Image (tube, helix red, strand yellow):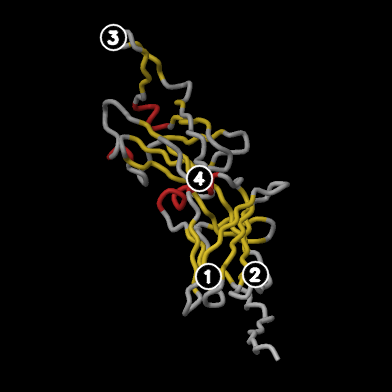
Amino acid sequence: WSPSQSLYLDVTEPIAPFIDSLPTSNVSVDLDGSTLTVFNRDTFQNGQKAFKGHAEPGSKVTLTVFDSLSPPGVLVKTVMAHAVDGSWSVVLSQQEWQGLSEGVIACKVKATDASGNISRESDPQRFYMDITPPTDPGIELSDSVVLRVNPQQATIRFLNLDDFQNGTWIHGTGEKGSTITLKINGNVVTSAIVVDSNNSWRFMLVNTPQKNWDQLIQDGPLNIEVVAIDAAKNTSQT
């Protein structure tokens, strides 16, 4: 008889891993009847960019992240689950994120145990990626505002008392659906102007007892600024 040998039989697949948290912000969007959290530019630059979850302790976790293109852009990352509690975490670099197309992103995980048995894949989870700030908004004053030439021969616009009391339009361009915040001399006049489907917006600057803008705006130069914020809370340049 030959010497006996021992074998260890393991034909049981590991339990399916799952994803606990996604690298998203507290912003959400409604899309095709579903509410998806958003991975926006602030999260991309400053936030928590890790996928986290649990799997069979000591197993190898494979995370697959893919976008909505056809064929999709795909990222595959592997990490070992903690030997005791099975926790795992995967962080994508900014370069890896930029390799995915903006829009709906889906992700799923599977686990491989020490014997090479592979679990079933987890149910996919989805979120929305938008890391592009809106286009910088443009701004113009109403054509009714008086044009004059100062002693240095520079053309400047003047608001007089009649303009201020009866109202003058401030208007401009921006990314459709974004929200415009308008500041004059550093003071927020409004943050509720929505850019229309023609990429245009307008706001009437008029003094009322309720607004008391005459306390904010004094005679002299007026510095008018606008900034746009899109649905993902990405912010344009001023």
Verify CB contact (< 8 Å) between mark 1 and mark 2.
Answer: yes
* Residue under pointer 4: 95
* Residue under pointer 2: 122
Could you tell me which secondary element the residue under label 4 belongs to?
helix
What kind of residue is marked 4?
Gln
Verify CB contact (< 8 Å) between mark 3 and mark 2.
Answer: no
Task: Give the Cα distance between marks 1 and 3.
Answer: 66 Å
Q: Tag 2 or tag 3, which sits nearer the N-term?
A: 2
Which one is in front, 153 or 6?
Answer: 6
What kind of residue is marked 2?
Ser
Q: Can you tell which quarter of the image residue 33 is in?
A: bottom right
Task: Give the Cα distance between marks 1 and 2.
Answer: 11 Å
Question: Residue placed farthest to the front in the image?
Answer: 1
- The residue positioned 63% from the left and 58% from the top of the image is 106
Kindly report which numbered mark, 3 or 2, lies closer to the viewer in this rendering.
2
How would you rate the neighbour count of disc 4 (Cα within 10 Å): few for under 14, some for 14-19, many for 20 or more?
few
The correct choice, above or below, for 81 with respect to 184 in the image is below
What kind of residue is marked 3?
Gln
Q: Can you tell which quarter of the image residue 149 is in?
A: top left
* Residue under pointer 3: 152
* Residue under pointer 1: 53
Task: Give the Cα distance between marks 1 and 4.
Answer: 23 Å
Q: Tag 4 or tag 1, which sits nearer the N-term?
A: 1
Could you tell me which secondary element the residue under label 2 belongs to?
loop
Residue 27, given in percent of the width and then of the height, sits at 51, 57
The correct choice, above or below, for 54 with respect to 188 in the image is below
Which one is in front, 237 or 84?
Answer: 84
